[in-house]
């Protein structure tokens, strides 16, 4: 994959050449319309299905079939209107909940999460490399400030001592 296949990274590259972007959508190659479409659909689904609003919508959907289940009990037999306990309504709710959501939506969510994980991994690798560079710089500065290390502040202290003795 070349950098022309994707946008310029906003946070540079890792030492292994992995581009680090601010947005998850910018991390993957977009050289074909098919790849762009799949990436956008997976990320959009992951973004919107992973919300409490979607949770409540799915909860209401699941509760749509509850009257049909309860009407099987003698106590609730005539409690619910016939419209909501019809076999066609039950079948539709079951198809949406069990077939569409489980067989179609969940794999798409997994793809979206994989895309988000790849982006997070690249950002984490860049952060780790930056922290290691900072740690090495601090270590080098501390070494130069050590009064016993040759080439650092020891040269200045020796120069000051020689000036004192020269007086």
Image: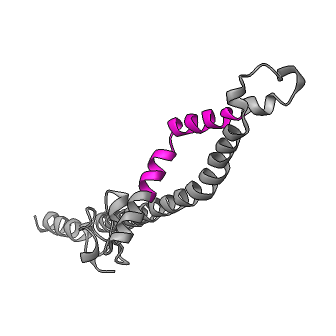
Give yes or no for residue 48 being in the magenta stretch: yes
Give yes or no for residue 115 being in the magenta stretch: no
Q: Which residue in the rendered view is the most extreme toward the bottom?
A: 1
Q: Residue at x 83, y 23 (%)?
A: 77
Q: Residue at x 33, y 70 (%)?
A: 33
Percent position (x, y) of residue 34?
Answer: 38, 70
Q: Quadrant of residue 7?
A: bottom left
Q: Residue at x 68, y 29 (%)?
A: 84
Residues 123 and 83: in front is 83
Residue 97 drawn above or below residue 32: above
Percent position (x, y) of residue 124?
Answer: 42, 62
Left or right side of 103 for 133: left
Percent position (x, y) of residue 5?
Answer: 28, 75
Decide if residue 33 is in sight here: yes
Where's the C terminus, which quadrant? bottom left
Q: Which residues are magenta?
A: 42-65
Where's the N terminus, which quadrant? bottom left
């Amino acid at each position: 994959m070349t950098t022309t296949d994707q946008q310029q990274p906003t946070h540079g590259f890792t030492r292994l050449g992995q581009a680090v972007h601010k947005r998850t959508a910018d991390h993957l190659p977009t050289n074909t319309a098919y790849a762009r479409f799949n990436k956008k659909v997976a990320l959009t689904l992951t973004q919107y299905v992973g919300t409490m609003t979607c949770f409540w919508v799915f909860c209401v959907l699941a509760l749509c079939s509850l009257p049909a289940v309860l009407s099987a009990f003698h106590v609730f037999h005539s409690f619910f209107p016939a419209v909501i306990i019809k076999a066609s309504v039950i079948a539709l709710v079951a198809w949406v909940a069990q077939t569409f959501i489980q067989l179609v939506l969940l794999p798409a969510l997994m793809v979206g999460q994989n895309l988000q994980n790849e982006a997070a991994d690249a950002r984490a690798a860049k952060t780790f490399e930056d922290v290691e560079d900072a740690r090495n710089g601090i270590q080098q500065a501390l070494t130069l400030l050590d009064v016993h290390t040759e080439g650092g502040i020891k040269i200045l202290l020796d120069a000051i001592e020689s000036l004192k003795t020269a007086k």
